[in-house]
Image (cartoon, rainbow, N blue to C red):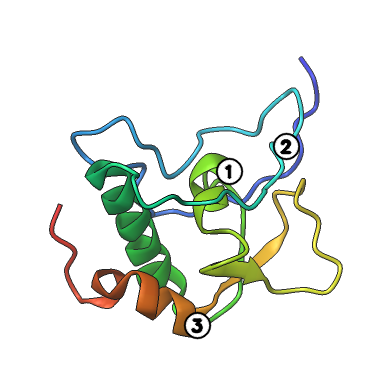
């Protein structure tokens, strides 16, 4: 069995959006290597469920970490990539998109404009 890279597990973070196949976390490090973060362009015709998943994920990040930088850890690369480079930005100069230890931070001004519902106390699913 290959040696897996260290990966912080964010305890208490929701595993996904209930009633959908959208996941927010992964269970274990990828033995084939860390999936790199990349900026994915959101288009206007994305489904309502896709938009809801983005908002719910940002809501969970906001309520777990607030304005503080946070480690990528076990947060799903696919879901992070929909927000990366926009609402989520690198929190360090030497950012490595292929590291579970990469530090991110919420770009609060843009995030509040893009997903105002994510900053409410309760997010209705």
* Residue 17 visible in the picture: no
Q: CA distance from mark 1 to mark 3?
A: 20 Å
Question: Residue 87: where, in percent of width, then height?
Answer: 51, 69
Q: Which label lies toward us, 1 or 3?
A: 1
Indicate the secondary structure of the residue bearing disc 3: loop
Of the 4 image quadrants, the one containing the N terminus is top right
Which residue lies at the image location 72% right of the left edge and 59% below the top edge?
102
Which residue lies at the image location 63% right of the left edge and 53% below the top edge?
39
Question: Residue 34: where, in percent of width, then height?
Answer: 72, 37
The reply to whether callout 1 and callout 2 are in contact (CB within 8 Å) is yes
Instruction: Point out which mark residue 67 bears.
Output: 3
Instruction: Point out which mark residue 77 bears.
Output: 1
Extreme right residue here?
A: 94
Kindly indicate the quadrant of the structure image that contains residue 60. Answer: bottom left
Extreme left residue here?
A: 124
Q: Earlier in the sequence, mark 3 or mark 2?
A: 2
Residue holding disc 2: 34
On screen, residue 123 versus residue 102, left or right, reads left
Kindly indicate the quadrant of the structure image that contains residue 93. Answer: bottom right
């Amino acid at each position: 069995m290959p040696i897996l890279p260290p990966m912080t597990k964010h305890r208490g973070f929701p595993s996904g959006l209930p009633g959908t196949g959208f996941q927010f976390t992964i269970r274990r490090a990828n033995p084939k290597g860390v999936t790199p973060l990349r900026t994915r362009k959101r288009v206007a015709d994305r489904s309502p469920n896709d938009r809801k998943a983005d908002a719910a994920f940002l809501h969970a990040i906001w309520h777990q970490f607030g304005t503080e930088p946070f480690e990528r850890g076990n947060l799903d690369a696919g879901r992070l990539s929909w927000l990366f480079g926009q609402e989520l930005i690198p929190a360090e100069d030497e950012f490595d998109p292929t590291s579970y230890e990469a530090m991110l931070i919420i770009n609060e001004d843009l995030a509040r404009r893009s997903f105002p519902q994510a900053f409410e106390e309760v997010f209705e699913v």
